[in-house]
Amino acid sequence: MLSVIIPAYNEGHHIHDNLLEINDELRTFCDSFEIIFVNDGSTDHTLVEAKRAAEKTDNIKIISYTENQGKGNATIEGYKAASKGFISILDADLDIPPKQIEPLLKMISETGADFVIQSKRHPHSCVKGFPIKRRFLSRSYNLLIKLLFNLPVSDTQVGVKLYRKDVVNTIMPKLLVKRYAADVEQIVLAHKHGYKIEECPVQIDFDPAGDRMRLKDILNIAVDTAAIYYRLNILRYYDSDEIAGQCHIEEKGIAGQNIIPEQEGII
């Protein structure tokens, strides 16, 4: 029923335990699932530790390539390998635990939504330890997103999202953002195609030590966001049906194996 994509870059110090924790948590509420771990060109021992976890369960598939290309690209590679009817994205550091996928599954069932995302601004959300600077940046960015795209959501950047597979089939061929504003591009495309989007509460115990946001990242996010607006409203790139005809999702799972071969440089 569920494919969970885990993009990761240099998470070797905890990825073995985190993958097994994800596996154990998913078993408590999901009868049929797969964990698609995407090693986005890590330079530490992330791949070795992920393989060690995969040896302990049949539910973990590994995609790996040598050059770091960004979370957006890692997510797209995970989409290509997903074989279940619902697809979720989960951050490798587990700031948001995998058990929080369950409410998203319930909401998608109860509301008939096509796409459910968590929001820090949902009235029932509980966010602890989120620095004032990050709160300001988050609110400012989401105000900008509202002005540019008029999306029916209050937060685009929280880690856990849940899609129906047909949403991914529709939007994936047109995704271009590989790094900083990939989440926004996905939501923009889902909204453009008329998919029903709902928001769900989130519980976050933020670890300031894991905060990697820098001025360079903020500038890159702005550039990526402006590019999405330009493609949407000026180039009308997302209107083209030809793109969808040139690209499609291939289900690349290999029976009896949990390592997925991909492009050059990928095991």
Image (cartoon, rainbow, N blue to C red):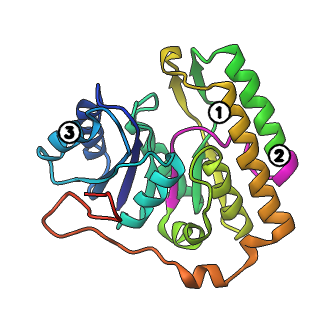
Q: Which residues are magenta?
A: 146-163
Is residue 152 shown in magenta? yes
Return the residue nearer the eye: 247 or 34: 247
Task: Give amino acid for label 3.
Answer: Val
How many numbered discs, if any? 3
Q: Earlier in the sequence, mark 3 or mark 2?
A: 3
For the N terminus, the quadrant is bottom left
Horizontally, is 86 left or right of 203 in the view? Answer: left
Is residue 147 shown in magenta? yes
- For disc 2, the neighbor class at 10 Å (few under 14, some 14 to 19, many from 20) is some
- For disc 1, the neighbor class at 10 Å (few under 14, some 14 to 19, many from 20) is few
Residue of label 3: 48
Separation of residues labelled 2 and 1 (CA atoms): 20 Å
Q: Which mark is residue 217?
A: 1
Regarding mark 3 in the picture, which secondary structure is present there?
helix
- For disc 3, the neighbor class at 10 Å (few under 14, some 14 to 19, many from 20) is few
Q: Nearer the viewer, mark 3 or mark 2?
A: 3
- Residue 21 vs 6, above or below: the answer is above
Residue of label 2: 146
- Can you tell which quarter of the image residue 12 is in? top left
Residue 84 appears in the figure: no
